[in-house]
Image (cartoon, coloured by chain):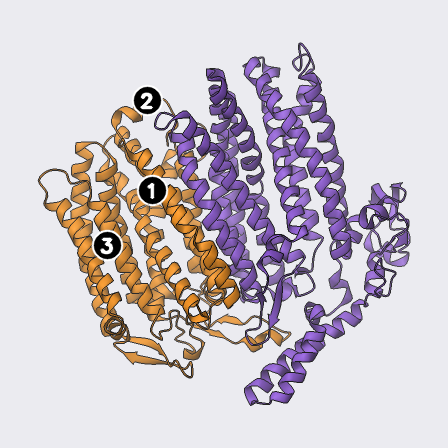
Chain colours: A purple, B orange
Amino acid sequence: MEDLVLWSRAQFALTAMYHWLFVPLTLGLGVIIGIVETIYYKTKKEQWKTITKFWMRLFGVNFAIGVATGLILEFQFGTNWSNYSWFVGDIFGAPLAIEGIMAFFLESTFIAIMFFGWNKVSKGFHLTATWLTVFGASISALWILIANAWMQYPIGMTFNPDTVRNEMTNFWAVALSPIAMNKVFHTVLSCWVVGAAACIGVSSWFLLKKRHIDLAKKSIKIAAPIGIIAILLTIYTGDGSAYHVAQKQPMKLAAMEGLYRGQTQAPLIALGILKPEEKIKQNDKNPFYLNIQIPYVLSFLGYRNIDAFVPGINDILDGAYPTQDGHIPLSAKEKMASGKIALQALSDYRTAKKEGNIYKAETSLQTLNANYANFGYGFITEESQLIPSVPITFYAFRFMVIVGTFFLFLFGLMWYLGYKKKPYENYKLLNWLCIAGVPLAYMVSQSGWVVAEVGRQPWVIQDLMPTYSAISSLQTSSVITTFIIFCLLFTILLIAELKIMFKQINKGF
Amino acid sequence: MDYTFFIQYWWFIISLLAALLVFLLFVQGGQTLIPQLSKTELEETMLVNSIGRKWEFTFTTLVTFGGAFFAAFPLFYSTSFGGAYWLWMIILFCFIIQAVSFEFRKKERNFLGTKTYNTFLLINGFLAPFLLGVVVGTFFTGSEFIINKDNFTTPFMPVISQWANSYHGLEALTNPRNILLGLVVLSLSRTLGSLYFINNVNDETLQKRAKKTATFCGTAFVILFITFLTITLLSEGFAVDPQTGIVSMEKYKYFNNLIEMPILLTILLIGTLSVLYGLGKTIFSKKTYTKGIWFAGTGAVLAILSLLLNIGYNNTAYYPSTFDLQSSITIFNSSSSYFTLRVMAAASLLVPIVFAYIFYTWRKMDKVSITKEEMQEEGHKY
């Protein structure tokens, strides 16, 4: 059973991470292409059309493999997470369906015009098609991110014991939850960062090779300001994200910070090396071999108050730590007991209902409702299952923040140099740095998801459903087999994509 | 409008999406015909580019179909996808390899070589329609699963839907009726593919060859379809008692449904006649008749819509379990809540707008059919 859960998770992680190699470029490069083509439409100068078409070629190659890897994500909720699909399908399915109706058709219809319509439709219609494709891709991101945010902060629903599932009661609470909105902006804007980094990186390569210097410089001049706006807003929404995590998923925040014992006026760990788990168990006050701290910042980021108490992992397990609103949190053991009561009450309710015992059904239902907030804890057998992988979450978070900040300086510099007479080509090292920025941008983007998804373990639905109870009942060997097939297939397709991409870049504008 | 209305409305939308998906499988059918129809590389390029500009619609409809089924009937989604794992996985794999093949096949340094991507298109072309047909076959013949919501509170294995054999969907391939429907869908997709080429490619030689395949595949389709329909209408069906919800076998259930819902019978007849008209006119016209795809396509959508409405409406279990009859899935026991169905019904009002812009752009792009000249020009090509 544990193996099955592990492999199901591994398969989801693999396919999601592969898919996420292609989505950011679609969203980010799409915006750049849209702007370049708008300039072409306004100025009617052929060179802007050349620039548009070059980036569009790369966009097309990337888009195809994005579609290929995306298919499995939609169906995987059913194939590998069937219990999840029933338990929350009433809420989770809707964004997926709306995504299909609103976004996918928009993308697939207008991308054909983007590529084949140059001589068939008017310039204005072509430009509209380009923007609609980008818009469609962004809308698609919107709905799937709403769905993801809902898993991290379930809202707008009620549990129905007769159907044994959660049912939606407020669509707007789901669609417009502040966590969803923050997530949408944070993620989509971070994709623009990847798009800008890719555009600048590839253009820098041309500058180093002394090819297409004019067109490459023009591309950088468009990408740099987009990049800087995007990274500033990504940092801003990242702060919002950390704030929400502190309120709704304190365990994730503690893991992100490697914080085992909480404190008031908590510092942020800028950099640190964690001790192994065994050593931390002996002394949880100092889990680091060495670290650099920024005083007060974690309390402020998490609660907008430098005196706020930020609970550590062990505080959350022990419960009864000081909170901002004064409520006294339950300990893990209490929550697990409450969860078991909820599960038992659900079972009693269903038995009583079958037997026609109305009184017992009613009392069981009351017990269930009173304990439903801890429902998922009923499946937890040991406290330790409630702790996500601290090293992965901790290091992924640092990587995201530190390398993300690097882009602030890189884009800023490129923007500034854009105003100089001989802007970029005199700085070979800078050109190389820009090229290195391309893989780094992808890694930053992936690490953001690692923080979000590893950090929320064991929950597939926060507090209500652990991964353990969400799976499909399959033989582990089946999932291992499909995992291997996906791994091989996607790797082969990725190699093909990269080879084609590099060849297309090499061919030039 | 009450809960029942919305459940039935959503079964209609799902059936319509499925019917449109089957129509759009003309892309897959077209893929299987490329080696047969083209004698030169230029002809191959014309055919690939002709369907290459439509493949995303099929793909998108498949994805939307999955999303809508999940949202409207989550119990089907969780039971079938999680249970008939292998059958669905093979279908998904053969769509994944399709998605990159058009874009990558002619690109320089594409790692696997044009031949491999062409083979991917062939695999997808044959397997996707066939296996989707087999899956729909199980809607008539049943699958082996058991659903017990009480499992949720058992700590050992809290999964409510369990597949009752270890083949996880592959067993569907052992049922001749499923195979038959698979072949029906495959031959239909090849027929529609031929008719589409006649419409979309402006080249006499190719049109002539496509007319031949339309004749051959069309005849095969008509024979197979009538056989399937006869067997189905004469077979037992999975009936639900509306009062108790108890599922039992009823003789001639699907035939009775047609009689009790004469509108479905009418749609089925109009659909079948429309397919025959489109096909017949293409085959027997002396001049090249290019409109066959529209009649045959519309007809196919109507006929399939009628069949799918038949298995969902009138107290019928649309995803029956032969292992545990009472676990059979009906539109009522598998649907989302009243609230969710209403929200999504509001979202579904966008569908006509989607149709409108697809129709508009399709018209604009297809005003000029694919020609040899266009394929020799510069520009984006597959």
Where does residue A445 sit, x and y in percent of width and height? 65, 40
Q: Is residue A2 in view from this perspective?
A: no
Q: Earlier in the sequence, mark 2 or mark 1?
A: 1
Under circle 3, the secondary element is: helix
CA–CA distance in space, label 3 to label 1: 18 Å
Vertical order, B99 against B113 (above or below)? below
Please state if A94 lies on the left or on the right of B119 as rendered. Answer: right
Q: Earlier in the sequence, mark 3 or mark 1?
A: 3
Please state if A233 lies on the left or on the right of A274 as rendered. Answer: left
Please identify, in this view, whether the residue under mark 3 or under mark 1 is nearer the observer.
1
Q: Chain of mark 3?
A: B
Q: Are the residues under badges 3 and 1 in a single subunit?
A: yes
The numbered disc on residue B377 is 2
Residue marked by disc 3: B299
Where does residue A351 sit, x and y in percent of width and height? 59, 85
- Quarter of image, res B9: bottom left
CA–CA distance in space, label 2 to label 1: 26 Å
Vertical order, A487 against A318 (above or below)? above
Under circle 2, the secondary element is: loop
Q: Chain of mark 2?
A: B
Give the crowd class for mark 2: few <14, some 14-19, many >=20 residues within 10 Å. Answer: few
Q: Amino acid at mark 2?
A: Glu
Residue marked by disc 1: B359
Please state if A417 lies on the left or on the right of B368 as rendered. Answer: right
Q: Amino acid at mark 1?
A: Phe
Which residue is more in the foreground, B118 or B146? B146
Under circle 1, the secondary element is: helix
